[in-house]
Structures are given as C-alpha cells and as structure tokens.
Image (cartoon, rainbow, N blue to C red):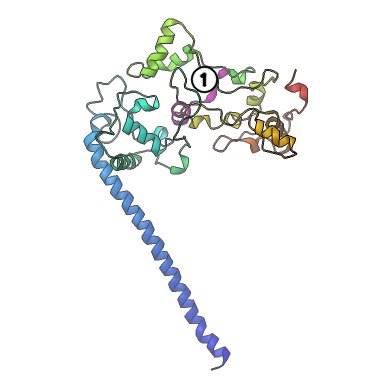
Amino acid sequence: MSRICVMRFLRPVLALTILAAGLAGGMLLWSRTSTARTATDVAVQRGQQVYAMYCATCHGLAGKGDGLSGQSLPIKPQDLTDGRVLNALPDHFLFTVISQGAQAVGLSPLMPPFKPQLSDTQLHDVIAYVRTLAQPAFDPKAVLPIPVKREGPVQPIFFSHAIHSGSYKLDCQYCHAGARRSSAAGLPSVERCMGCHRVVAAQGNPEVQKLLGYWDRKESIPWVRVFRVPEYVKFTHKNHVQAGLPCQTCHGRIEAMEQVAAGLTGQSLVNDLKNLAGMTPVPNRLTMGWCVECHRAANAKDLASLAWIGSPVPTLTREKPKAPLDCVECHH
C-alpha cells in the first residue's frame, strides 16, 4: 500500500480518535462537575434540616430574622437573606459566629455558640444553606480576605472594620472626617459613634455598652494608635484624599480587618542593611522610599495605578497638580 493510501486511511481514524478523546475528557469533566454539584446540593439539604431545627426559631424559616423567639430580643436577629451584608463575609467568619457565638466577632452574645450541639460538618452545612438564601446571590469572588488570625493591638472596644466597613460598607470618611479637611484623619468622637448606637444595638451588646460607659462618663475612648510616621515627616491626609488616593493604598485592606494591624510599615533594619550592600529591596509602606516611588508612579501613570485591589479607581485629569518630589514638601 502506498504512503498516500496509508495517510488517506489514517486521517479519518486519527480524527475519530481525537474526537473520542475529547468526548471522554468532556464526560470526565462533566462527571466531576456533576459530582461536586451533587455534593453541594446534599450539603445544602442537610444544612436546611439543621437550620430548621436550631436556627429558624430566631431567624425564621425563610431566614428574614422574624422567628418567634427572636421577636422579644433587644437586637433583632440578622436577616440572612440580605446578601448586601452577608455576602462579603467569608465562610470561616460565619463559622466562628455560629460555633463560638456572635460575641467572638464583637457582636451580640444573644446569638449563642452552637459548637457543643453541632459538629463541624453540620456547621459547614448550615453555612452552605444560608448562602442560598442571599439576595443578591452569593458570589465567592466578592468575599473579603478577612484573615483567620487577628493581628494588631487589642483596642479598648472591639470595633470591627470588617463589620462596619466591609459588611455594612460605611465610608471611611464617615468616621474619619478629618481626612478630607486636615493633615490628620482623626478618630471618631464618642458623639459620632453614638449617632448610630443610640439606636443600633443600644442593648444586648457588651462592646456597645462600653461605648455607652464612655458617653456617660464624658470620656474619650483611649484607642491604641496603629499607624505612625516619624515626627520629622509632615504627612497631610487632605492632599492625598483630594487627589483621589484610596485609603487602602497606605493602610491596606482596612475593610477586611477585624482588628487593625499596620503590617510591614516603617523603617526596617534588614532593608537598611540591604541598601548599604548595594541591593534594592522593596521598601516597606510608610517609609521615604515607598512614598517617593508612589509619587513617581502617580506622575507617570496617574493615581489609577496606585489603587488597592478592590478599591474604587480614582479619576484624575491632566490639569491636576503633579505629586511633589521636593524634600521640603514632607520635611519642614
């Protein structure tokens, strides 16, 4: 048989082989996807049963927070169908709330711990079911990267930015109003906090009771400072906020922090030694090298390149002034 005849014979055989392999791969992928969906569906069904037995009495059968036992509580049970609030919170956060009680994340202990009664599997099943109640629908890509382990100093009141800024989406400047007006962002006064908490969780939350104590005693809250720059550096929040720079650029993903931590900021002896050795390490945030690089990048690409992932991208026009690089801008 000639080579041409062999090739004519093999071509359809090869095509059929490739087609069969493709179909087999597709069937395998479909099988795996189908199996995963089936497992998820089973978990949701189990979770619905556990929810009906342990959760519906307060949160209601439909999850709207209208259960009979919850009607007499000073704080209304959470509406689990409100995806605007719950969708940003990761599974491990909800697991902590259900297993250890809401007080473990700074909320009301009226939501008790269920770890003694429920296994880890049952807890995960309940979370899987609750996710199906959310409107708008739950999107895993929109979940905040809240760390499992908290970092940073313990504050006199457990104020969770993950709850206030991440879940309820309060704007940073609602509390830190000085950021757009002056050099210092400032801390919210007790009066500002009471503007909400005269009504919101005014009873039934020990952390809010601490706030009420400061209010009654006419005392300021002794917050522990987290972010610092050296005394010889004059940093102005106002200029940066008015330029459209997101707060997250300098402070990190604050909206994903239960307990605020500065992370790797400020001078580093290791980096100093590397610089002396002629190396070029990436500077830590809130250091001179980092600020200068930020200003240079702002001038080269506008501030859009500096926006932290997940934060709004600022809009700049060419008429806006350039980020200064003169020494006297910060050292005067």
The front one of 70 and 277 is 277
Q: Left or right: where does residue 303 sit relative to residue 60?
A: right
Is residue 314 a member of the stretch shown in magenta? no
Q: Is residue 297 visible?
A: no
Q: Left or right: where does residue 97 sit relative to residue 272?
A: left
Is residue 162 a member of the stretch shown in magenta? yes
Percent of width and height locating residue 114: 28, 32
Residues shaded magenta: 160-177
Q: Amino acid at mark 1?
A: Cys
Q: Name which quarter of the figure residue 130 lies in.
A: top left
Q: Name which quarter of the figure residue 262 lies in.
A: top right
Residue 168 higher or lower than 282, as above or below: above
Residue beneath disc 1: 175
Residue 307 higher or lower than 183, as above or below: below
Judged from the image, the secondary structure of the residue bearing numbered disc 1 is helix
The front one of 154 and 52 is 154
Residue ID at (63%, 25%): 241
Residue 289 higher or lower than 40, as above or below: above
Percent of width and height locating residue 318: 73, 34
Residue ID at (42%, 69%): 23
Quadrant where the image shows the C terminus: top right
Secondary structure character of the magenta stretch overall: helix
Percent of width and height locating residue 197: 40, 16
